[in-house]
Amino acid sequence: GAVVSQHPSWVICKSGTSVKIECRSLDFQATTMFWYRQFPKQSLMLMATSNEGSKATYEQGVEKDKFLINHASLTLSTLTVTSAHPEDSSFYICSARPGARDGYTFGSGTRLTVV
Amino acid sequence: AQTVTQSQPEMSVQEAETVTLSCTYDTSESDYYLFWYKQPPSRQMILVIRQEAYKQQNATENRFSVNFQKAAKSFSLKISDSQLGDAAMYFCAYRRNNNDMRFGAGTRLTVKP
């Protein structure tokens, strides 16, 4: 089946530094990928829609200058958390849809801890 | 705006018994998709079952089935013959055509041996 690979699975960084998270579709092309954020014991909240070859679409309240998204190819989208702060600590998950009628396939997630 | 509501934060079921998880949604669209995802402690999101709104027949996947009531905007998940491995967070989700997916708050299912 369709696989979405997400790396790293966990990362610890210092306040003020930047962290890049990669999301790859391994056996299908994804013109659109989605980035979600999940706080402990809460649901997935959509952060942004990543579009190949164009600018990402951000949800209301998500700082686009802080959460930089790049979708340079049909199989790779990256999320960069810039100038990270402890409140950015969370679980970040990407997803993509292999076909028009399919459910979304999710990456395994990245646990970010900012100290 | 589309919203998804799961009114049961936690549910518990005895092993081998049946449990039903509730989900309601709000939309003005007629064409959309509904999903149930399972998130075990690993936090990997796993698709359990999906339903196209235009289909009247309820979707079934082995021990998992749904009761889709389009007029009532209700989409419940029934798990039969519950197994210990079914213990997880379950999220109901809505997607309109090529748009993004919106999730409910989730229901934590505990399976008692």
Image (spheres, coloured by chain):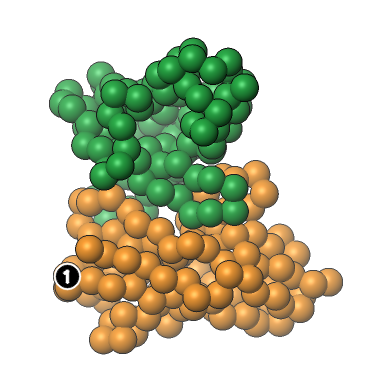
Chain colours: A green, B orange
Residue with the most extreme top position: A17
* Placement of B44 over or under A112, stated as above or below: below
Question: Is residue B60 among what the camera can see?
Answer: no
Judging by the rendered image, the residue that carries numbered circle 1 is B29
Question: Is residue B5 among what the camera can see?
Answer: yes
The three-letter amino acid code for the residue at tag 1 is: Glu
Indicate the quadrant where residue A70 lies: top left
* Placement of B3 over or under B55, stated as above or below: above
Under circle 1, the secondary element is loop
Viewer-proximal residue, A63 or B1? A63
* Placement of A52 over or under B13, stated as above or below: above
* Residue A78, image x, y percentages: 37, 23
Q: Is residue B15 left or right of residue A65?
A: right
Residue that appears at 52% across and 49% down: B45
Which quadrant holds the N terminus of chain B?
bottom left
Protein chain holding label 1: B
* Residue A45, image x, y percentages: 40, 49
Residue with the most extreme right position: B113
Viewer-proximal residue, A28 or B44? B44
Residue that appears at 68% across and 63% down: B87
* Residue A35, image x, y percentages: 37, 38
Viewer-proximal residue, A6 or A91? A91
* Residue B16, image x, y percentages: 74, 78
Residue that appears at 64% across and 59% down: B88
Q: Is residue B30 left or right of residue B73?
A: left
Residue that appears at 49% across and 31% down: A88
